[in-house]
Image: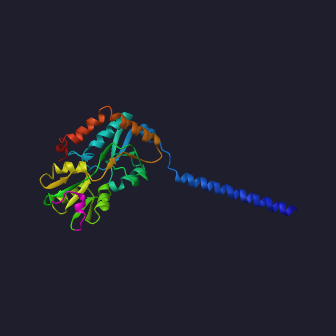
Amino acid sequence: MKKVLLGLLAFTLIFALSSCQQSQQDQSAQTAQQPVSEDVINTVLKRGKLLVGLEAGYMPFEMRDKEGNIIGFDVDMTTAMAKAMGVEVEYVNTNWDGIIPALMTRKFDIIASGMTVTQGRNLKINFANPYITVGQSILLNKKHEGKITSYEQLNNPRYTVASKLGTTGEQAVKRMIPRAKYLSYETEQEGSLEVINGRIDAFIYDLPFNAILASSKGKGRIVHLDTPFTFEPLGWAIRKGDPDFINWLNNFLYQVKNDGTYDEIYAKWFKDSSWLEKVQ
């Protein structure tokens, strides 16, 4: 009987230890699945500087002037953002295809670079409320004027259609114009120049950039089909696990959209073209 009782006791202890270890493993797995909690606001305040990730090549959101300074709509908005925080701002110029990984590895605090809010991106990062809405439009080579009037007509293997690598323009072409021959370019300047020079039939990209290019470098050489065929809200992106930063950004956006700050910055970059002289 004593041996039986000792055996039962040993079994009970082994079972209890096993259950405890399993519980610890389950808790560790749950912790690993949860996003790491962050406090970017306090980090920024202690540092005295807001680090903003962008790619300086998307007119009029962010670009370089003749002196090499980064200017644009997003630059003015994040300058106002840093001022509201009482800190300086620094821009970290980053290639577009690596901008989300750079955010996630803490190279900067926020992406403010005309980024479209998509469900795919939202699985990896969080977005504040959209600050502007754009869509994809079409730059056509002059030879197609009057013959092609919508994106559906480009859905033919005889046409070569391009966009920028890793953008929603590229996604739109592959999803909505799948039969056309597709080319991808590293920059929007390269792709738009190809359509101006007649080496491709159409360039698909965000409406603001296309509108500016059509009225400047491409004037008389390309046709702009300026009715967007996609709906694309743009938002500031941050790492997951920081509800305080999202809250602050949304309240900042609400403030500037109602105190005249946003309207002043918008008019400067979207209603006035005098800034083009600084970048051409």
Q: Quadrant location of residue 148?
A: bottom left
Identify the residue at the far right of this view.
1
Identify the residue at the far bottom of this view.
157
Q: Position of residue 216 (x, y in %)?
A: 15, 49
> Is residue 213 in view from this perspective?
yes
Q: Position of residue 166 (x, y in %)?
A: 33, 57
Q: Which residue is drawn at 80% across and 60% down?
A: 8
Q: Where is residue 278 in the image (x, y as percent from the top left)?
A: 19, 43
Q: In this view, does 128 lie above or below 151?
A: above
Instruction: Indicate whether residue 139 is drawn in magenta.
Output: no
Q: Residue at x 25, y 47 (%)?
A: 63
> Is residue 87 in view from this perspective?
no
Q: Nearer the viewer, residue 21 or 65?
A: 21
Q: Where is residue 19 in the image (x, y as percent from the top left)?
A: 68, 57
| 259 on left or right of 140 | right
| 110 on left or right of 224 | right
Quadrant holding the N terminus: bottom right
Q: Indicate how the structure is coloured in the image.
A: rainbow
Magenta stretch bounds: 147-157
